[in-house]
Image (spheres, grey):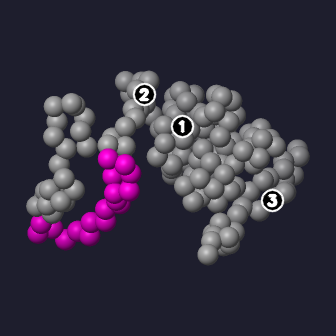
Amino acid sequence: MRYKAQDQAPTIRDFMAEVRRKIEGRDLLLMVEPDARLWAKPGAADAGSIPKEHEFAEFIIVDAAMNDLLRPSFYQSHHEILPVREASRGTVRADVVGPVCESGDFLALDREMPNALPGDLLAVWTAGAYGFAMASNYNSRTRPAEVIVEGAAWRVARARETYEDLVRGEG
């Protein structure tokens, strides 16, 4: 990857030779995900930029992604994000982001949030009808379940899609 105009990007072969040299003799299994250069038009994989809005940012990485709830990315809609079980670990100012590697894959930016730890369950409130209506299978992700909450009661209105649902129409 070239970061400056004067940089010379290594070939994939040269890059992998250097990676092999660095890990040689170690008891490691290296798995490499091919990047967009393998199928994109020449130069297309190097296009684009990522805006830097903070010098330092805390991230709360969640399972939900922009394909599940697109509204925050599209027009900065606000959805309360609260822990399902309260814990007294204080708060943190953080970006709540999903696992899809896109600059728009966020549910909240620069938000004061309860300090969540791995395994904590968070509820995204007021997604409403537009949440599911705008959901997609982008990045081969299944669409989320729809849950209706009425007071202390809740019920599943539509189950989460399964992998079988996702590939049903494939040949």
Q: Tell me whether circle 3 and circle 1 mark residues in contact (CB < 8 Å).
A: no
Calculate the distance from the C-alpha at mark 1 to the C-alpha at mark 2. Answer: 11 Å
Q: Is residue 56 left or right of residue 143?
A: left
Question: Quick one: SS at disc 1?
Answer: loop
Farthest-out residue, bottom: 171
Residue at label 2?
A: 51
Where residue 21 appears, as percent x and y from the top left, is 10, 61
Residue segment shown in magenta: 24-42
Q: Residue at x 51, y 32 (%)?
A: 94
Q: Tell me whether circle 3 and circle 2 mark residues in contact (CB < 8 Å).
A: no
Q: Nearer the viewer, mark 3 or mark 1?
A: 1
User: Of the residues under marks 3 and 2, which one precedes in the sequence?
Assistant: 2
Calculate the distance from the C-alpha at mark 3 to the C-alpha at mark 1. Answer: 26 Å
User: In the depicted view, which residue is nearer to us: 94 or 86?
Assistant: 94
User: Of the residues under marks 1 and 2, which one precedes in the sequence?
Assistant: 2
Question: Quick one: SS at disc 2?
Answer: loop
Amino acid under label 2? Pro
Residue 115 appears in the figure: no
Q: Which numbered dot is residue 104? A: 1
Q: Examine the residues drawn in magenta and state their main secondary structure.
A: loop
Q: Residue at x 38, y 51 (%)?
A: 40
Q: Which numbered dot is residue 158? A: 3
Farthest-out residue, front: 41
The magenta stretch spans residue 137:
no
Residue 139 appears in the figure: yes
Q: Nearer the viewer, mark 3 or mark 2?
A: 2
